[in-house]
Amino acid sequence: MTQTSDNVTWLTQEAYNQLKAELEYLSGPARQEISLKIAAAREEGDLRENGGYHAAKEEQGKQELRVRQLTQLLENAKVGEAPSANGVVAPGMVVTIAFDGDEDDTLEFLLASREYASSDIETYSPQSPLGDGVNGKKIGEDAEYELPNGRTATVKILDAKPYQG
């Protein structure tokens, strides 16, 4: 899991390996694939009206941006242990909260960097208002965070356990 502070990103070994594999794919085979798409589109003729060419170039730009992001992230990464199951909310944990003391109105989410976001569970960054509010709190404690309208909301920490991915 990840937590970013002062340009250092903390990752479990598993997360580091996953991001490194993505970088290796994007830097190698994916670059070759996009180059072939661009070359094929060039051969179709006039580039000004060639939708395939422009789409491939746009895809290449997005891919290169992701390569730069991953490179920077991994250069500043520190590999550490997954959080312990001690009931204290920390990055890399699945957190269950109740809104405004209503234990029926709950939300379960992964507290982690967007780099580790999963389609399996909603992810909140430790730097988000909610993530910052719950980080470091214990099960049973209340946490406050600021809403977009400037008001403050209170949630109760119901559970915090390491993400098993």
Image (tube, helix red, strand yellow):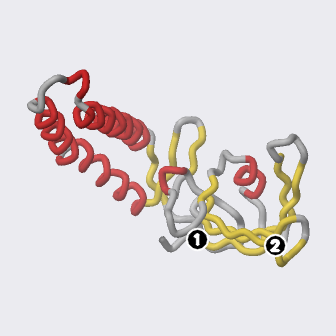
Compared with residue 87, is residue 135 higher up or lower down, i.e. above or below?
A: above
Q: Tell which of 120 and 128 is nearer to you.
A: 120
User: Dot 1: few (<14), some (14–19), or many (≥20) neighbours within 10 Å?
Assistant: many
Residue pictured at 72% horizontal, 71% vertical = 96
- Expressed as whole percent of the image width and height from the top left, the position of residue 102 reads 89, 73
> Dot 2 corresponds to which residue?
105
Amino acid type for the residue under numbered disc 1: Pro
| Picture quadrant of residue 92 | bottom right
- Expressed as whole percent of the image width and height from the top left, the position of residue 26 reads 27, 45
Residue pictured at 72% horizontal, 56% vertical = 135
Q: For this view, does 64 lie left or right of residue 88? A: left
Q: For this view, does 71 lie left or right of residue 151? A: left
Q: Tell which of 127 and 75 is nearer to you.
A: 127
- Expressed as whole percent of the image width and height from the top left, the position of residue 112 reads 58, 56
| Front tag of 2 and 1 | 2
- Expressed as whole percent of the image width and height from the top left, the position of residue 140 reads 83, 72
Mark linked to residue 70: none
CA gap, disc 2 to disc 1?
22 Å
Q: For this view, does 67 lie left or right of residue 35? A: right
Residue pictured at 25% horizontal, 26% vertical = 49
Mark 2 falls on what kind of element? strand
Residue extending farthest to the left is 43
- Report the number of numbered marks: 2
Mark 1 falls on what kind of element? strand
Sequence-first disc among 2 and 1 = 2
Residue pictured at 53% horizontal, 53% vertical = 2
Amino acid type for the residue under numbered disc 2: Asp
Compared with residue 135, is residue 147 higher up or lower down, i.e. above or below?
A: above
User: Dot 2: few (<14), some (14–19), or many (≥20) neighbours within 10 Å?
Assistant: few
> Dot 1 corresponds to which residue?
162
